[in-house]
Image (cartoon, helix red, strand yellow):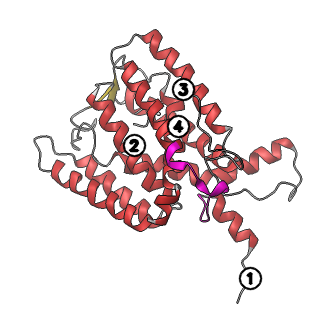
Amino acid sequence: MTRPDPAEGAAATAVGGSGPPRGGGAGGGRVALVLMGWLSLVLLADHDGSLTLQRFLGLATWGVLLLALRRVDATVRAQTAVVVVVATVVEYVFSPGLEVYTYRFDNVPAYVPPGHGLVYLSAYALGHAPWVRRHLDRATWLVVVGLGTWAALALRGDRPDVLGAFWFLCLLGFLRWGPSREVYVGAAVVVTWLEVLGTELATWTWQPTDPTGLVSIGNPPTGAAGGYGWFDLAGLLLAPTVLAAWARLRGDRPGAAAPPETAAVTSEAGPDPVPSGPADAGR
């Protein structure tokens, strides 16, 4: 019987965690509901609100994100930071830049960058909830069958959703080969809900085709969670690099810092945290 290699375990946890979350993941589902609830309220409030209200919602969402980050370890903070940066760049390129989708004021709402952070934390919390982890294979099949059926039906509609079908194929790849199946299962639920809500409220609208006019797009794309999965992948894979760079900036000696623990959206001890204070709240 071979002894587990601690280095291998640390590497695994740094890219998404293969073991149980710190604190056992208790309350992960409730945390996800709280964060998704906040994002949903933001979208409802912005439905017919002013630009000033939108900016206030942005400040409030940053506050909720900072509170939520206090309840996670350094690994998940780094993952969340990478997701926020990458997603924000993509937002500015594809919305006001290429106009693949547009927001009400033809901008990127102030709540969108921190909203991406909350989307990631929601997906992580939901995917690591004990009842999801116990039935991960079943949850994966539910996601595949549900979104796959929607994607297939959308290809036959008046506005064939080719982009959504492609992104669904991306999601299949992430679920099969991605570094954290739990995160992708959670993201499939969170992102799909927020995309449906955001487009239904006309907070943002997807164009019928991409800028080339060759790829038709649904409103929303059925496989949006697969497109969002690239943000998750960046966060999961780049977090160790971010943590190492941060350690060098702090002047930490090699080996001085403890190996990153498996991230969790619950506190290490005490009652399950519920932040006081969500497409994607941004998309």
Q: Locate residue 120, reporting x and y percent.
A: 52, 44
Which residue is located at x 54 percent, y 31 percent? 114
Task: Give the spatial CA distance, label 4 vs label 1.
Answer: 38 Å
Segment tinted magenta in the rendering: 16-30
How crowded pointer 4 is (Cα within 10 Å; few <14, some 14-19, many 20+) is rated as many
Mark 1 belongs to which amino acid? Arg
Mark 4 belongs to which amino acid? Leu
State the SS at label 3: helix
Task: Give the spatial CA distance, label 4 vs label 2.
Answer: 11 Å
Task: Give the spatial CA distance, label 1 vs label 2.
Answer: 40 Å
Disc 3 marks which residue?
Answer: 61
Q: Check contact, mark 3 vs mark 4: CB within 8 A.
A: yes
Q: Locate residue 141, reporting x and y percent.
A: 34, 64
Q: In the picture, which quadrant includes the N terminus?
A: bottom right
In primary-sequence order, the first of circles 3 and 4 is: 3
Task: Give the spatial CA distance, label 3 vs label 2.
Answer: 17 Å
Which residue is located at x 80 percent, y 47 percent? 247
Q: In the picture, which quadrant includes the C terminus?
A: top left
Q: Which mark is residue 171?
A: none
Q: Check contact, mark 3 vs mark 1: CB within 8 A.
A: no
Work out whether residue 30 or residue 254 is closer to the camera in this orientation and state it: 30
State the SS at label 4: helix
Q: Locate residue 147, reporting x and y percent.
A: 28, 54
State the SS at label 2: helix
As for residue 83 lying within the magenta part, the answer is no
